[in-house]
Image (spheres, rainbow, N blue to C red):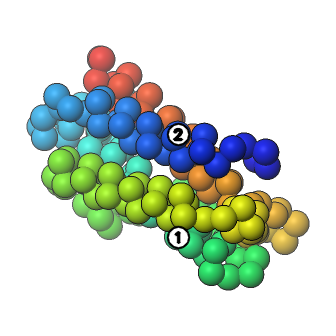
Amino acid sequence: MKGLPNEWLLDGLEHSCQTLEHILVDVSQEQAQVIRDGDEGWSVLEILCHLRDYQAIFAERIRRILDEDSPIFMPYDEGARLGLVVENDYANQDLRAVFADYAATRRQMIDLLASLDEDQWRREGRFAVDDVVDLTMPVVHTLLHDADHSEQIARILRG
């Protein structure tokens, strides 16, 4: 990821949030709860809750990279991801409140990243003993995660 201009990453974070807002602008609470990605897939609301909760995980990784020397991150397994759906009652949350939380957390992430100097951007963390990543990795992961699920939401809303 080294070599990506920080401004591109910050713009990407801003634009991916705006894209999701545009996709959801006319979606009702009922539609968000009912429209699913296939018979066994998640609803629009559940996908948005997942984006919100995983963004908090990515933000925590960024904070740890900034606050700790070479923090080690544990990967999130499928069981933990699915557990959040039930534990946080994704199916019954309020669409607009979830998006507001997502957007506020995104704004905090952008503001933090915009305040960093080049040395802070080069700080590193680890996912495994030999898997070193710099600060751009959780930022890029956030962007790719947004793109994947924004496409999913747009696709299922089109039917």
User: From what the image shows, is residue 154 above or below residue 113?
Assistant: above
* Residue 70, position as x, y percentages in the image: 76, 76
Q: Nearer the viewer, mark 2 or mark 1?
A: 2
Asked whether, in this view, residue 124 is left or right of residue 32, the answer is right
Element on which disc 2 rests: helix
Q: Nearer the viewer, residue 79 or 51?
A: 51
Residue occupying the point 72% across, 43% down = 4
Q: In the image shown, does 15 or 44 lie closer to the viewer?
A: 15
Question: Marks 2 and 1, how far apart in space?
Answer: 19 Å
Q: Is residue 134 left or right of residue 103?
A: right
Three-letter residue code for mark 1? Glu
139 in relation to 145, above or below: below
Q: Is disc 1 placed on a helix, strand or loop?
A: helix
Q: Along the horizontal axis of the image, is 2 left or right of 96?
A: right
Q: Is residue 9 visible?
A: yes
Residue sitting at the far bottom: 68
Q: Amino acid at mark 2?
A: Gly
Residue 138, image quadrant: bottom right
The C terminus lies in which quarter of the figure? top left
Mark seen at residue 109: none
Give the residue pinned by disc 1.
Answer: 60
Residue drawn 53% across and 58% down?
Answer: 114
Please provide percent x and percent y for residue 125: 73, 69
Residue under circle 2?
12
Residue 79 in sight in this render: no
Q: Residue at x 88, y 66 (%)?
A: 130
Q: Give x and y (percent) for residue 14.
A: 44, 43
